[in-house]
Image: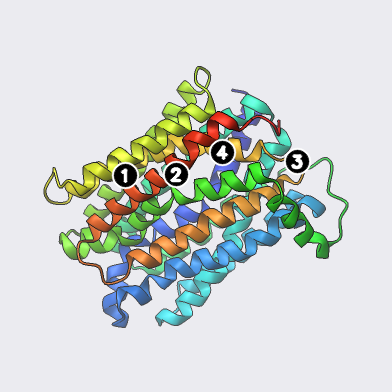
Amino acid sequence: MKTNTLKMMCLLALLAAFPPLSTDMYLPALPLLQQIWQQPMSVVNLTLSGFFIGFCISMLLYGPLSDKYGRKPLLMVGIMIYIAASFVSGFVDDIYHLICLRVLQGVGASSGVVISMAITKDLYEGKQRQRILAYMAVIMALAPMLAPILGGVIMAWLSWNWVFFMQAVMGMIALGGVFWLKEPLQEPENIRVFETMRLYLKLFGNWRYIGLVLLFSVIVLPHFSFIGSASNIYISHFGMSEQVFSYFFAFNAAAIMAGSFICTRIQRRMASEKIVTIGFAGILAAGLFMHADLVAGPWGLALPMALSSFFFGLSRPPSNYLVLLQVDRGAGTASSLMIFLYFVVAAFAMWFISLDWTGTIHVIARMAIFSALFVLAIWLPMVKKLDLNAGE
């Protein structure tokens, strides 16, 4: 792989990794903040859901604005918002100020995710873009693998405040990379800003695009349910330290990276839709494994969840590739709507799993079983009739 392509891929992966870096690094601190501020976990988890609320709402603007004004200016603005919100978060002394700042942090982070996805369509075509997306997924998987370990180390040696200071540093590194980036968008959209809604309405009229986005959004339910409950299960229920929890969480993230890596190996010999089908079937098998209680203790969650995460990592690059294949222009807007719907489901999953459930692990298992069965029931007939390459 050429040096320039590798540098670009690393920058795009860092930008797209803002959400896992912003959430997973912070997970070891959740039980401590619950104790410090004497709040129920459902309120503390609003710092996670709030991040994704700001993330989802703002991304609907970043995509079409970047289609009109270029990728680089919007990235610069978004990353600076992220840096400021991260830095100030380290000084708050109550949960409600932190929730508000996390919403603002999400507003900044969404620029990196949406625009990095659009840049892959600006610069690469066909199988090369699919290969870049798969390699990006491998690099991005390092973020949820290393972030909780780093968060655990910070909790052990410093304090929870330094988690946010470290995120501000991460933002500064990304800002430096974007500063040297040459504008990748060669043909800006000649539209007025208020015409943004018309672009979204046009996407909703593209039944191939919107059908795949809505379908693939459902499969994120078990993944984000686990993220929203993992620290409470491992630390509060199983009695682990923040550091040990971070290793278990990193094990799950390593499974995502393994799935994405395998995707890079098999995509040249196997059609994207077949890889996606295998991924969905694997998530179903993992949900059944978890619900069967075949393994006792923390490994009863860790092993089947790692299996689910492996197949999630396997299916994500080709599913994103298939979605973006369905549009010819306006990649920024299409990326915005796609990721918006993914993370709306993610925010719902993290709120839902924080309710006062008995047997949270079984709830995650049922979400995996339900989502995989639902998606497969629609996907398998669809893939036989739908010309998935129609937009290329």
Give percent across and percent down for residue 264.
49, 26
Task: Determine crowd level at label 2: few under 14, some 14-19, many 20+ residues with C-alpha closer than 10 A.
Answer: some
Name the residue furthest top: 269
The residue wearing badge 2 is 375
Which element carries disc 3, helix, strand or loop? loop
Q: CA distance from mark 3 to mark 4?
A: 15 Å
Give percent across and percent down for residue 185.
78, 43
The residue wearing badge 3 is 184
- Which of the two marks, 4 or 2, is nearer to us in this view? 2
Q: CA distance from mark 4 to mark 2?
A: 32 Å
Q: Which mark is residue 83?
A: none
Disc on the earlier residue, 1 or 2: 1
Which element carries disc 1, helix, strand or loop? helix
Q: CA distance from mark 4 to mark 1?
A: 22 Å
229 on left or right of 331: left
Identify the image quadrant of the N terminus.
top right
Q: CA distance from mark 2 to mark 3?
A: 35 Å
Q: Amino acid at mark 3?
A: Pro
Which element carries disc 2, helix, strand or loop? helix
Q: Amino acid at mark 2?
A: Val
Which element carries disc 4, helix, strand or loop? helix
Q: Residue at x 36, y 61 (%)?
A: 228
The residue wearing badge 4 is 10
The reply to whether the C-beta atoms of the residues labelled 4 and 1 are less than 8 Å apart is no
Which of the two residues, 106 or 191, is positioned nearer the viewer here?
191
Q: CA distance from mark 1 to mark 2?
A: 23 Å
The residue wearing badge 1 is 252
Disc on the earlier residue, 4 or 2: 4
Which of the two residues, 64 or 85, is positioned nearer the viewer here?
64
Q: Amino acid at mark 1?
A: Asn
- Which of the two marks, 3 or 4, is nearer to us in this view? 3
